[in-house]
Image (spheres, grey):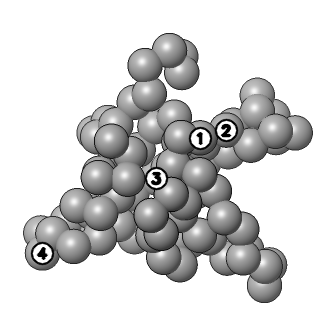
Amino acid sequence: MARKVLCELLWHPEKSLADASITYIHRGAPGDRITISGAEIERLDQAHFIIKRRGRETWIPYHRITEIKAGDEVLYRKIGAG
């Protein structure tokens, strides 16, 4: 489901992946969560999305996404991610 939302933001002419915020599980981060801008996403793969930070590519599985927002609107929230 998270992948479907990201694809819609990427391809829909009236929506923008760059304006979205994506929160995902990141072990070691405060609260084991990190939030990035959709603008940091380099590409969407079948099972992962790829971000580039500090010159390094990182592959993040879609199942780690806990929330996707566009402004204040929650587009996706993983059940039990509280």
Q: Which residue is mark 3?
A: 21
| Separation of marks 4 and 2 at Cα, in angstroms | 29 Å
User: Residue 34, position in %: x, y?
Assistant: 67, 45
- Foreground tag (3 vs 2): 2
Q: Which residue is mark 1?
A: 64
Q: Residue at x 15, y 69 (%)?
A: 12
Q: Earlier in the sequence, mark 4 or mark 2?
A: 4
Q: Which residue is mark 2?
A: 25
| Separation of marks 2 and 1 at Cα, in angstroms | 5 Å
| Separation of marks 3 and 2 at Cα, in angstroms | 14 Å
**Disc 3, SS:** strand
- Foreground tag (4 vs 2): 2
**Disc 4, SS:** loop
Q: Amino acid at mark 4?
A: Pro
Q: Which residue is mark 4?
A: 13
Whether tag 2 and tag 1 are in contact, CB under 8 A, the answer is yes
Q: Amino acid at mark 1?
A: Arg
Q: Earlier in the sequence, mark 2 or mark 1?
A: 2
